[in-house]
Amino acid sequence: MPTISEIDELPSILSDPDLKYLAKKNQGGKNQRDGYSFELAYATYQFGKLLGRIREGGVNASSLWIALQVSCFIDDVVVGLRDGILWIEAKRGDVTWRTGEESRRIEDNFVAQMNADRKTGRFRGKNNMYCLVVGSERRAKLLRDALPDTFQGSHSMVVAFTEGRPDQIDISGGSLVATVMRKLLPENVSRYRYDPENPSPLELEDLRTCVNDILALVHQLPSGEVNMIADLLPQIDSECRNVRWRPKPPKLAEDVRDILKNVEGLTVVSSNGRVNYELDDGPEGTLSCILGTESGRRFEQAVRDANPKYLNEVLTIFRENSNG
Amino acid sequence: MADSRQEDVAAAIDRHLADLETGSRALGAVLHDMGEELVNLWPLDRTIEGKNVHVVCTAEDLDFMASGFMSALRGKGGRPFYSCFWNEYRVNDVEGFIPDTSYMIAQYNQKNVPKADELVAIASSLTEYATVASNLSRVIDRVGRVPQPLVFVPASTGDEFDRLFKSFEARGFYPPPFVISGIPIASYGMRRHVDVHGIFRDWTIREYGGYDHAFIPETIGSQMPALKYGI
C-alpha cells in the first residue's frame, strides 16, 4: 500500500485528545445509513470522474487513489490526484460551518486538516483542496457566502450535490452524475440518439447500470484505506460490465476475423470494441459480444477452436459468449 | 365498488402456485395458465377488444406466462405482440442498499408491428425487479405515447413491489406503471408464499443448462428460421 503522508503521518503530529477524537469520529461508518448513503453517492460520482480522466487520456491511473472514512479531520471521501489531495466532507442535512461539538465544528475540522497538511503534506498542503458537499444549492450558497476567514490561504469550496440516495441517483439530462458517467459508457451506446432535453431510455438504462456498477464497487471498498485506482481497474473490468475506462476499444483479432469472413449467411461486424452479426435476410435482434473482456477472449478462442464453416456454428458461439 | 374478479383470480392463482410448489403439473403449463388467468384482471376502464397490446417480457417468461397471457388476450379480441429480452441479473447488495443491476444481453422485437395502444409487462415474479424496470423502460421510449403501462405478476411480496416502485421512481416515471398482482400484495407478502422465481430458475437451469443464457424461446424460434439451427 502506498504511503500518503497526509494520512499516514497525521497521528505522529496529533495530541492524545485529537487521536481519541479521530478514533471516535469514524465509529458511525456504514451503519449510519442516511449519512453514508449521501457519502456513497458522492464518492461514486468522484470515482466516475477519476475513471473519466483515465479514459480521456493523459492521466496515469497509478497516480490516482480514493479513500473513504479515513482517520482524519476531513474524512468522508479523500481523492488523491497527481499533484494534490481533494478532501471531502459530505453533509446531507442543513449544516452551517459551526455545526458540531465545541472546537470540533465543521470549520474547526477543516482548519485542523489544513494545518496538519501544512506539516505533513508532500507540497505542504499547497495543492490540496478542501471541499464541503451539501444536499442543496441553496445551502451551498449560504455556506459559500459565510466562508470562514480562518480558511484564508487554503483552497476551499462548497459544492451542492442534489443527485440523491444510491437507489434514486438522478441520471437525467443535465445532472452531475449523468455528465460524468456518460463518458464511461461502452462505445456501442453511441448508436442510440441522445438529446439532453429528452434523453432516450435506451441510453438511460445503460447509464443506470453503469452507475449501479460503480456504486456497488465503491460500496465494497474497505473504509479507512487508500485504494489505488490502478489496482481497481482489473476489478472494474470483471465486475462493471457497463463501465469503460480504456481509451481505445480493442479490435477483433485478425485471425478470428478471417475465419468468420468465410461463413455464409451472415456478416460479422466488429466496431467500437464489440462484435456482432447481421444475418443475411434475417430478423431484427442481436446477440453481440464485447471484446477485451473475459467473455470476449472466450469468444475469440471459441472461434479459433471451432473454426466454424456454417451459420449455426457461429450463432452457437455467439449465444454462449454474448455479454452485452 | 370492490372488483369482484380479484377473489376468483386469486383463488385460481393460489391453486396454480400450489401446483408449482408440489410439481404436480408441468411447470410450463402452470405458468401458461397463470398468464391466461391474469388477463381477467385487465382494468375495467380500459377495453381490450381491437387494441394493439405490446407485451414486454424476458426470454424465460415468453413461452409460458407471456404466451398464456397473449393467448387469452387474443380470445378477448386484443392484438398482442411482444418484445423479449435476455437479461443477466446481479444483486449488488443483499441488504438492498444498492439497487440491483439487470444487464440487457440481447433483445428481440417483432417486425412490422402496429402502433401500440397498451403497453404491458408480464413477469412470473418481481424477485428480479430491476429486470422488469429496465426492460419496460427500454420499450416505453419505442412505443411512444400509451396509457399508464401495466405490470402483471401472479404474486409478489410487499418488499419486491416497493423496490419495483422505487426503480420506476428513480427512472423518473411518475406515476410508475400500475402493478396488477394475481394475489393482492399485502404488507406481509403474498398470502401463500411460493418462491416462483426459485422454482422457475431451477427448472430453466435444468432445461437450458443456465439461467442467463441466451437460449431462443420456442415462440421466437418458430418465427426465426435462421435461428432454428443449433437450438
Image (cartoon, rainbow, N blue to C red):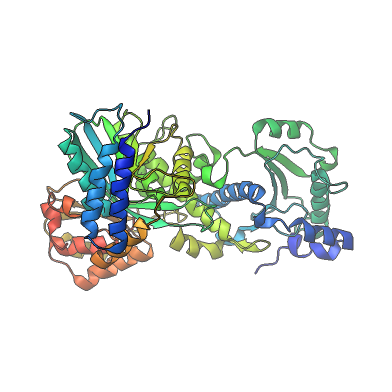
Q: Quadrant of the N terminus of chain A?
A: bottom right
**Towards the viewer: B95 or A113:** B95
Q: Nearer the viewer, residue A122 or B171?
A: B171
Decide which of A134, A146 is in the foreground and name it.
A134
| Residue B48 in view in this figure | yes
* Residue at image point 57% right, 47% down: A45
| Picture quadrant of residue B215 | bottom left
Q: Residue at x 26, y 48 (%)?
A: B34
The image quadrant of residue A106 is top right
In the displayed structure, B81 sits above or below A68; it is above
Which of the two residues, B205 or A183, is positioned nearer the viewer here? B205
Q: Position of residue A34 (x, y in %)?
A: 64, 47
Q: Is residue A15 above or below residue B190?
A: below
- x, y (%) of residue B44? 30, 29
Name the residue at the bottom extreme.
A305
Number of on-image labels: 0
For the point 82% across and 45% down, the residue is A105
Which of the 4 quarters of the picture holds residue A289? bottom left
